[in-house]
Image: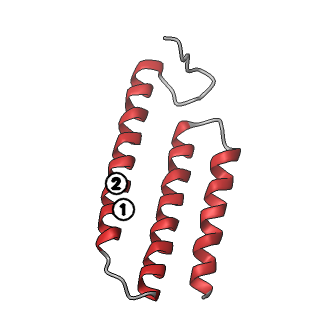
Amino acid sequence: MMILSFSIFTGLLGFLVFCSNRKHLLLTLLSLEFIVLSLYLLMTLVLNLYSFEYFLLMVFLTFSVCEGALGLSILVSLIRTHGNDYFQSFNVLC
């Protein structure tokens, strides 16, 4: 039960960091990955508690890896075009 509350606490902490940090894109992506990892831990504990199969975890892990790769590719392309990862320097219209 303590691990379950730890997983929920880490998810809320990652969500707090995601909402409060608006300066760098890299820190925002890292907080999103932290939320995904805490959700993965929570889903593992719940599926283990009810003795279900772990096939859903493999699908979730696959999509989270794709999300991380997409975020890093967007970060690299923005750094190549703008020179940094500050949110204030991005122009949405260009």
Residue depicted at 61% across the width and 58% down the height? 14
How is the protein colored in the picture? secondary structure
Q: Position of residue 12 (x, y in %)?
A: 65, 62
Q: Position of residue 38 (x, y in %)?
A: 52, 67
* Residue position for label 2: 63
Above or below residue 85? Residue 60 is below
Residue 7 lies left or right of residue 22; in this view the side is left
Q: Position of residue 42 (x, y in %)?
A: 51, 73
Residue depicted at 56% across the width and 44% down the height? 28
Amino acid marked by disc 2: Phe
Above or below residue 74? Residue 17 is below
Quadrant for residue 20, please give it: top right
Above or below residue 70? Residue 61 is below
Quadrant for residue 88, please give it: top right
Amino acid marked by disc 1: Phe
Whether pointer 2 and pointer 1 mark residues with C-beta atoms closer than 8 Å, the reply is yes
Along the line of sight, the residue nearer the viewer: 2 or 54? 54
Residue 30 lies left or right of residue 74; in this view the side is right
* Residue position for label 1: 60
